[in-house]
Image (cartoon, rainbow, N blue to C red):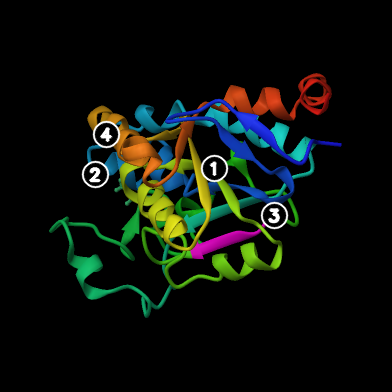
Amino acid sequence: MLPTKISIAGEPYPFEMMPAHCALLIIDMQRDFLEPGGFGEMLGNDVSQLRRTIEPNKRLLAAWREAGLLAIHTREGHRPDLADLPPAKKVRGHSAITIGDKGPMGRILIRGEAGHDIIPELYPAPGEPVIDKPGKGAFFATDLHAILQNRDIRQLVVTGVTTEVCVNTTVREANDRGYECMVLDDCVGSYFPEFQKMGLEMIKAQGGIFGWVGTSQTIIDALAPGQTMKGAA
Ligand code: TIU
């Protein structure tokens, strides 16, 4: 049994994690953002900046599942008929190939296409909710808030990609809805190192204006049986 509360080292100060009320939220670890030959790389981005998050996320997810806690996955994407794709999002960037067009791994960011799906390394287990979101934030136009409320979740450990876009947007949305968020620096990634750094700074500045920043190993240690005994003593 895990303790009711576990103090997790983090910035700007320790995060008092309540395992029964805390979910792991893994943002958009999709093939099109992370895999060589995908949409992200096609746009000229360096996917290795994101791929370094795969192993730490894998270890964290395994420990999280082992502890019997709730893990939730998100995917950014749209309906095949593009009815939920704002025209402004479709044309943004003036790219030759945009959302809904045929890309290297099927139609880009369209639900049901190979590139839209989650990478095999972090594939959701049966029973783990998958949130299909049309925006950058995971709360916009989704049932995430309802799912969290129904499970009495009040805290989120947030990982995934990209740090300054979908992770930051989601953490801000969650914060305004009353959730406490801890973002794990080794489990979130940006194509741009300077945005990785500042994306994390912006969360923990001003006394943790949007939440906490920590590291996956601290949480894995807290969830491990040996550490749990110590924490309970
Ligand atoms: N998931 C997510 O962050 N979607 C993006 O479009 N990110 C970029 O950094 N472009």
The disc labelled 2 sits on which kind of residue? Leu
Instruction: Give the camera-side residue of 48 and 200.
Output: 200
**SS type, badge 1:** loop
Q: Residue at x 36, y 41 (%)?
A: 203
Mark 1: which amino acid?
A: Ile
Quarter of the picture containing the N terminus is top right
CA gap, disc 2 and disc 3: 31 Å
Mark 2 and mark 4: Cα distance apart in space: 22 Å
In the rendered view, would you say 19 is above or below 178? above
Res. 37 visible in picture: no
Outermost residue on the right side: it is 1
178 is higher (above) or lower (below) than 39: below
Q: Position of residue 188 (x, y in %)?
A: 44, 35
Residue 33 shows in the view: yes
- The residue to which callout 4 is attached is 198
The answer to whether residue 129 is magenta is yes
- Label 2: which residue? 43
Q: Which residues are magenta?
A: 128-132
Quadrant of residue 227 in the image? Answer: top right
**Marks 3 and 1, Cα distance to the nearest angstrom?**
15 Å
> Could you say which disc has been placed on residue 162 in the image?
none
Helix, strand or loop at label 3? It is loop
Gap in Å between the C-alphas at discs 4 and 1?
26 Å
Dot 2 or dot 3: first in sequence order is 2
Bin the neighbour count of mark 3 within 10 Å (Cα to Cα): few under 14, some 14-19, many 20 and up.
few
